[in-house]
Image (cartoon, rainbow, N blue to C red):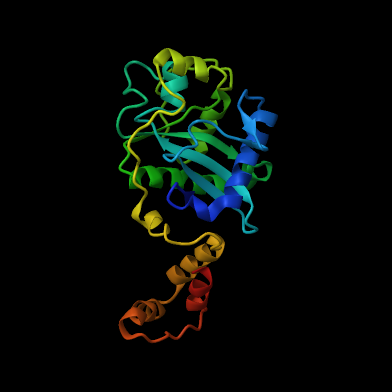
Amino acid sequence: MIHLVTAVHRHLYGRELLELHRLRCRHFIEERRWALEAREGGEYDAYDDERAAYLIGFSPEREIEVACRIRPTDGGGVLPDLFPHLVSPTEPPADAPGMFECTRYFAVERARGRAGFVARSRLHVAMVEHVRDLAGCRLLGFVDLPLLTHLRRFSGLRIRPVGFPATYDGGHNRLRDRRHRRGLGRHVRAPAVAAPAAVRRLAWLPCGVDVFDLERSVRLLLAAPEVHRAALDGRAADGLEPADPDGVWQALARAA
């Protein structure tokens, strides 16, 4: 299952987000040798801010398999700040309204190749759904050229190049220079992007709630026969505990 983690409910994913940044460090700094900043065992940058959303795919054992960061670019981003030359002048600029970028996409070793096809496919669908839910018009990203053909054939995404290939240094070691020349501070401030309604409804949940039990509860509820769902819906109206032969209510109670 893919979990969407936004600033609204990151407090529910403290341990998982620490692991996410640790895996980013391993993938981008240790494996790919990108010149990125690492601290406390994890990789972070200026775009891990309140506007960033993380899509994380977990295995049945609750281990991270795939992940990426989705962020609006109207106010700055990796592409418009560091790689604007990768977007052709004939295309809308990377920081135009309605634009989002996918960055820090990775799959752990066991989720690469054929073995990880389903996990990656779920992530691709979630990327498009998240941008659609926020009324975005385009999702941008950049990828190493050898992977482009593979993604166009097997990702299920409608991918269209918006610029010519170019070399890059794999890191953000030019970030401070670029921001200084453009008169930007460490963070580019912009209006917050509203989270989807389903995510906002999770904001009241306290720290310590098991998000995986919550996920299981939702799965049970969606899979329950219509008569059981109707019983759950009617509980608030009549104050009665519904019959629960499939364990739906017990799972919801544990999650809450």
Q: Image quarter for residue 128?
A: top left
Residue 126 percent location from the top left of the image? 45, 47
Q: Residue at x 34, y 22 (%)?
A: 93
Vertical side of 182 occupied by 126: above or below: below
Decide which of 56, 43 is in the foreground and name it. Answer: 43
Residue 219 percent location from the top left of the image? 48, 66
Q: Residue at x 61, y 54 (%)?
A: 59
Q: Is residue 256 left or right of residue 115?
A: left
Q: Residue at x 37, y 48 (%)?
A: 195
Residue 40 percent location from the top left of the image? 66, 37
Decide which of 56, 183 is in the foreground and name it. Answer: 183
Q: Residue at x 57, y 46 (%)?
A: 17
Decide which of 59, 113 is in the foreground and name it. Answer: 59
Residue 25 percent location from the top left of the image? 64, 35
Q: Is residue 117 visible?
A: no
Q: Is residue 158 left or right of residue 44?
A: left
Residue reaching furthest to the right: 30
Vertical side of 71 occupied by 188: above or below: above
Residue reaching furthest to the top: 181
